[in-house]
């Protein structure tokens, strides 16, 4: 009798498990559009077609308040967050690079001296500096490595940090070819070799970037030719932009910079992503695969022309068409009903300071020029503790971290903590500074504000300097007088799209506070695999069926 009573329960369990298995997608696709503010989806929406961003907005679960909760809003840290569900305080990717005080050299976030590139010159890259796992790693482990995890981007750090420690393949652009490093394999797959042999990257030489829409459609943007925009690699400040580099007659290294600073760089990556789907038979092997695609060209364009430029608007509209073509390809190859697609970004961008002051001259906005600022900080320490006989008080400045020279602190008989505190006190008095903390302060800080929490999430005891600072809104660090940047804890840098669409997703608009750190854990919950190690992000259960 007890067994008969258990039958309905067992049947319910069986049907639930069957339903969960049936909901699992054949292919998970994570699309990261580098330097893409959340507000672009609204500002440029009237010009989107039916199959790209609009498809995600209408069919997906959109989190309108998704913000990075760290202060170093950069490409490396942003992409590390997406599928680890952690911030730099846990995953170790605190910035695009940092100073190694022991080796006394700059460290790039995905550098690996033990790895070399395949089919291209240059340094090797790997996740050696990443201190935790990703959703892709846990997916591979859960399926006895039957699932494939493939990550592609124009930038190595985007591809490497989304993929994790144990992917099937990671590829990025190195001038005229797509490459990988010996960390992953010792031979490029045939489909990559075929793509490179076809000369796709060099095939754009001589193309001209024109506006996609009628000129009047760009009326909500800044003027097309303003002195605070960049004009490098032969592109010029105004449409049309020739994509040749500095030499119009032949391909030189500057051509590849011009290509990436145009929508054609995104077109090349989309073609390579399609080749990856076909070459690896992703989504067709009876197990869930993961494809990560990091489009880098919007970042190059945003740095050069700024978020209020006609170029950024045109890139967004063209990105919409590129995604529409890619989604149509997925429909034909895998079937969108079998896919789960995530759309997000690694960070936003600050407005060009001169754009702000051209409309409001008294606004507190500008550029903190790194070398003069470093010299002023050095002078302040010399006034307080005396000028060193040899060397300088400040050994390095790297991504808002200041590293003191231990030889000098020993020579002057000054405790490094005392010198760091004096420097932090000096920086706080500067009009450009929102906050400055010493290493010792951050190590024990219990955050009492959003700013403090975001700075704490970008602090790692082995990689952050003696003093760590954040700039006030509308200030950027600068080495030049044109273009703009990102890397601060403010919402124009932190607020990005986060949309889930497809298999297992409940469509809707969700205004809850969310973070891109939620992407990895949510995918883990949907697929029934372990969470990434040390995850901080939450499962967005409201978006799951």
Image (spheres, grey):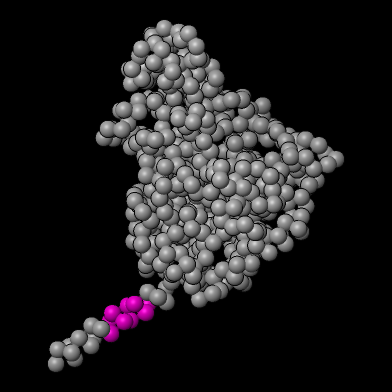
Q: At 58% from the left edge and 47% from the top edge, which residue is drawn?
A: 115
Q: At 66% from the left edge and 29% from the top edge, which residue is drawn?
A: 226
Q: At 70% from the left edge and 60% from the top edge, which residue is drawn?
A: 193
Where residue 112 appears, as percent x and y from the top left, is 54, 44
Count of labels in the image: 0
Query: In front: 182, or 513?
Result: 182
Query: In front: 107, or 285?
Result: 107
Q: Quadrant of residue 5?
A: bottom left
Instruction: Answer with left or right where residue 522 lies relative to residue 174.
Output: left
Any part of residue 274 in sight:
no
Any part of residue 180 in sight:
yes
Instruction: Answer with left or right where residue 336 lies relative to residue 543.
Output: right
Where residue 383 appears, as percent x and y from the top left, is 42, 7
* Outermost residue to the right: 249
Q: At 45% from the left edge and 64% from the top edge, which residue is drawn?
A: 140
| Magenta-span inclusion, residue 13 | yes
Instruction: Answer with left or right where residue 392 lies relative to residue 321.
Output: left
Chief SS of the magenta region:
helix
Image quarter hosting the C terminus: bottom left
Magenta span covers which residues?
A: 11-19
Image height of 268 relative to 545, above or below? above
Image height of 111 relative to 422, above or below? below
Q: Quadrant of residue 432?
A: top left
Image quarter hosting the N terminus: bottom left
Q: Quadrant of residue 355?
A: top right
Where residue 2 appears, as percent x and y from the top left, is 14, 89
């Amino acid at each position: 009798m007890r067994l008969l009573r258990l039958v309905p329960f067992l049947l319910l369990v069986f049907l639930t498990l069957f339903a969960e298995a049936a909901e699992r997608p054949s292919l998970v696709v994570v699309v990261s559009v580098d330097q893409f503010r959340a507000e672009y989806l609204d500002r440029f929406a009237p010009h989107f077609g039916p199959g790209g961003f609009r498809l995600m907005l209408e069919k997906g679960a959109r989190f309108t308040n998704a913000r990075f909760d760290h202060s170093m809003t950069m490409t490396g840290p942003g992409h590390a967050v997406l599928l680890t569900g952690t911030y730099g305080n846990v995953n170790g990717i605190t910035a695009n690079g940092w100073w190694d005080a022991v080796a006394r050299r700059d460290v790039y976030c995905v550098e690996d001296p033990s790895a070399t590139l395949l089919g291209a010159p240059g340094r090797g890259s790997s996740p050696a500096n990443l201190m935790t796992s990703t959703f892709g790693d846990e997916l591979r482990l859960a399926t006895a490595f039957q699932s494939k995890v493939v990550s592609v981007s124009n930038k190595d750090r985007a591809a490497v940090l989304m993929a994790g420690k144990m992917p099937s393949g990671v590829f990025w652009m190195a001038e005229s070819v797509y490459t990988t490093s010996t960390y992953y394999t010792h031979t490029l797959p045939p489909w990559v070799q075929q793509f490179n042999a076809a000369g796709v990257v060099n095939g754009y030489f001589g193309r001209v970037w024109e506006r996609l829409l009628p000129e009047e459609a760009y009326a909500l943007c800044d003027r097309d030719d303003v002195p605070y925009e960049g004009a490098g690699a032969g592109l010029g400040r105004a449409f049309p932009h020739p994509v040749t580099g500095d030499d119009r007659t032949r391909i030189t290294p500057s051509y590849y910079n011009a290509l990436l600073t145009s929508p054609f760089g995104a077109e090349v990556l989309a073609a390579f992503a399609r080749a990856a789907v076909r070459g690896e038979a992703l989504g067709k092997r009876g197990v869930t695969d993961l494809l990560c695609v990091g489009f880098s060209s919007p970042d190059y364009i945003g740095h050069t022309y700024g978020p209020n430029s006609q170029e950024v608007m045109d890139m967004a509209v063209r990105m919409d068409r590129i995604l529409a073509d890619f989604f149509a390809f997925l429909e034909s190859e895998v079937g969108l009903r079998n896919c789960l697609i995530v759309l997000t970004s690694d960070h936003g961008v600050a407005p060009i300071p001169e754009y702000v002051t051209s409309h409001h001259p008294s606004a507190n906005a500008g550029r903190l020029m790194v070398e003069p600022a470093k010299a002023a900080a050095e002078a302040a320490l010399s006034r307080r503790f005396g000028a060193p006989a040899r060397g300088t008080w400040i050994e390095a400045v790297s991504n808002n971290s200041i590293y003191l020279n231990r030889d000098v602190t020993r020579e002057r008989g000054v405790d490094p903590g005392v010198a760091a505190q004096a420097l932090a006190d000096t920086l706080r008095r500067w009009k450009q500074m929102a906050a400055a903390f010493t290493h010792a302060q951050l190590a024990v800080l219990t955050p009492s504000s959003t700013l403090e929490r975001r700075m704490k999430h970008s602090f790692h005891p082995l990689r952050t300097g003696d003093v760590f600072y954040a700039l006030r809104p509308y200030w950027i660090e600068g080495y030049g007088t044109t273009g703009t940047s990102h890397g601060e804890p403010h919402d124009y840098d932190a607020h990005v799209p986060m949309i889930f669409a497809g298999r297992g997703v409940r469509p809707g608009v969700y205004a809850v506070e969310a973070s891109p750190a939620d992407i990895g854990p949510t995918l883990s919950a949907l697929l029934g695999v372990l969470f990434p190690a040390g995850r901080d992000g939450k499962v967005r259960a409201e978006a799951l069926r």
